[in-house]
Amino acid sequence: MAEIDVCPLDELPPGAVKIVHAGEISACVYNLGGELYAIEDRCSHDDGPLCEGEVDHEAGTVECPRHGSNFDLRTGRALTPPAYAPVETFPVRVADGLVKVDLA
């Protein structure tokens, strides 16, 4: 896997999220107040989708919609049970006005 284009930066304003798929990997790209972060779209507790969860933009967290585990969007760290293991994070950058994520 390599770096993939997500969208033009103006399509991902603060507070927005985009889901990207590459092979068997899905990731959520979040704009938290102008900072971009990408995490795996998979709860480490039961493999449920994280991107469907509620985001707390101030705290920088996402809540798994299945069982309520919270994850830090910056680090992927599990913050509350039932999840204990982190989820993977991916580097995000902007080049020539395009948001790109490295799913390698």
Image (cartoon, rainbow, N blue to C red):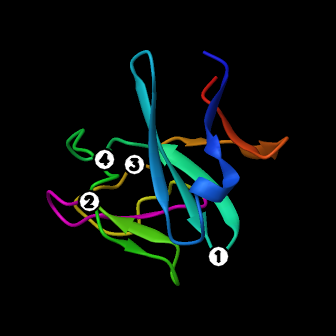
The answer to which of marks 4 and 1 sits earlier in the sequence is 1
Mark 2 Cα-neighbour bin, 10 Å: few <14, some 14–19, many ≥20? many
What separation in Å lies between label 3 and label 2 (alpha carbons)?
A: 13 Å
The answer to which of marks 3 and 2 sits earlier in the sequence is 2
Label 4 with label 3: CB-CB less than 8 Å: no
Q: Under tag 3, what secondary structure?
A: loop
Residue 90 image-quadrant placement? top right
Checking the image for residue 33, the label placed there is 1
Which range of residues does the magenta coloring cover?
A: 64-74
Q: Main secondary structure of the magenta part?
A: loop
Q: Amino acid at mark 4?
A: Cys
Checking the image for residue 43, the label placed there is 4
Checking the image for residue 64, the label placed there is 2
Q: Amino acid at mark 2?
A: Cys
Give the residue number, with chain letter if any, for mark 3: 85
The quadrant of the picture occupied by the C terminus is top right
Q: Residue at x 60, y 61 (%)?
A: 74
Mark 4 Cα-neighbour bin, 10 Å: few <14, some 14–19, many ≥20? many
Q: Nearer the viewer, residue 53 or 70?
A: 53
Q: Amino acid at mark 1?
A: Gly
Q: Is residue 80 above or below residue 86?
A: below
Q: Position of residue 88 (x, y in %)?
A: 51, 41
